[in-house]
Image: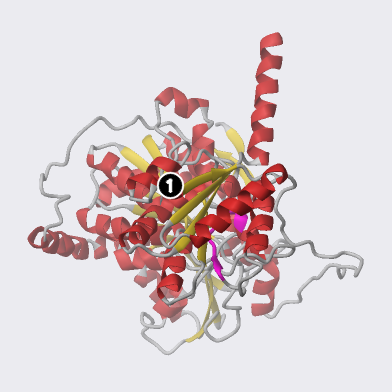
Amino acid sequence: MQHNLFLGVEAIAQGAIDGGISGVYAYPGTPSTEITEFIQGSEQANKKGIRSKWSANEKTAYETALGMSYAGKRALVCMKHVGLNVAADAFVNSAITGINGGLVLAVADDPSMHSSQNEQDSRFYAKLAMIPVLEPSNQQESYDMAHEGFSISEKLGVPVMLRITTRLAHSRAVVVKKAETEQNTLALPADPTQFVLLPAIARNRYKNLLSKQNIFEKLAAVSKYNSLKIKPGKNLGIIVCGIAYNYLYENYKDSECPYSVMKISQYPIPSEMLQELGENCEEVLVLEEGYPLVEETVKSIFKKNIKISGKLNGILPRDGELNTGIVAKALGKTILTGAAIPDIVVSRPPALCQGCGHHEMYAVLNRVLEPYSKGRVLSDIGCYTLGALPPYKSIYSCVDMGASITMAKGAADAGLIPSIAVIGDSTFTHSGITGLLDAVNDNSNILVIISDNESVSMTGGQESSALGKIESICAGVGVNADHIRVAVPLKKNHDEMIKILEEEIAWNGVSVVIFRRECVQAAAKKKRSEINRKNEKAD
């Protein structure tokens, strides 16, 4: 048996490779990014011809993966939790169409918002779509679930969600690999109408999905990932989901947990197993990462009146990640704390990299906007969002991918002139193009600044879908060619940049100014790679 030290995300990637995928589709988003990067860098995946380039956004990723499934092959699609908002239309409808080749959605939630706008729980999307969820408690289960998820998907005829959270995604443990599964051969659906969601067909497909719910639960009831250990004579029972299983047992390293424990790592919740837990206790503590989905659900399943504790009654916090200490407190155990952080240690807020082109962009933008009141710059999601912090304090919004352009348009519609959007290159092609089209169609009086550093820099410098295409895209949606301007954000070009911005602010219509300069981190990485290649040739 081969042993490997894998991050949770790497375990998923390797499990999918060994599980017989023919393609992975994704848009970079922490903490899911490394799943795709691992496959891109895998010699094994390369030899197998596994397709692994980045998609423009999560919706296109999911739809393309569904297309591979339509053709009979196994596909993995990866995204972070907020990315599932973008892919939701295709995701929910794919539960109704069903699959042909196995389809697994690996979605990484981010409780505590380490690098996200919210803490939403992707399990609720799976509940909405009525499909099974696999939620690993450790890296080995991450590998196993990815490896087996495609066969489960094919057996049940629906997509399967594989849900992890940040702490599991980015921690390492030893993983034992399984035998490799051969890729599926090309095979179109037996039912030629399966993927045609005309209302008459969709109604029947929906009834088919409803009829499978009992099958999903029966499979969860016998799943090796779910378990129930009864401790007679104890009033308290504990339900643990996913990684929370570790937080519970870290409180009993030298002894056995004295309470009845039900572990849930495959959904839907097996009701008979839950009833057995309820028959042996008077109170149930629910430990789950994210929203209180299980806690809300079990209240309606128990036949007798049982006290349910967890996030809804304040025993556990509603926000942030769980950890061993939080669980210890909920169990009434002593919490071990380390030494207090000395006053000399000062927290350091995030900042733009030294030499980053965003510095000069914001310096010029602030200078040009001096005659106007504050609050005229609507921004987007990327490294440039740090322009909200000192020393620049330039931007006044960061809501979701692509919202800078549409919010600037709405503000201009309300009479806020000038109204300016700041958006990055990859975010522009992810979700900004349609907003720009709206602005052109309405001849909105807005200035769109596209800060083009030629990569998806915030998530590690992946290749941007916008590379070499921005001017032609803007022209293609109808922006006047005379008002598509390009400048290089360097101090030596300070006066030129001011002149361009002042002219475009004065223009009554849609203007696009592209500040183009390669990301300093990507440039350094590229230089290191070139040096390494030269050294290898010399050897």
| Residue lying at the far top of the rendered structure | 538
Q: 20 or 430: which is nearer to us?
A: 430
478 left or right, relative to 357: left
Element on which disc 1 rests:
helix
Crowd rating for badge 1 (residues with CA inside 10 Å; few <14, some 14–19, many 20+): few
Q: Mark 1 points at which residue?
A: 482
Q: Quadrant of residue 346?
A: bottom right
Q: What residue type is labelled 1?
A: Asp
- Residue 312 to residue 348: above or below: below
Report if residue 209 lies within the magenta region: no
127 left or right, relative to 35: left
The residue lying at 46 percent from left, 72 percent from top is: 411
The residue lying at 54 percent from left, 37 percent from top is: 38
Q: In which quarter of the image is residue 168?
A: bottom right
Residue 90: percent from left, percent from top: 29, 55
Q: Is any part of residue 19 visible from this angle?
A: yes
Q: Give the range drawn in magenta.
A: 376-384
The residue lying at 35 percent from left, 41 percent from top is: 75
Q: Is any part of residue 78 visible from this angle?
A: no
Residue 114: percent from left, percent from top: 62, 61
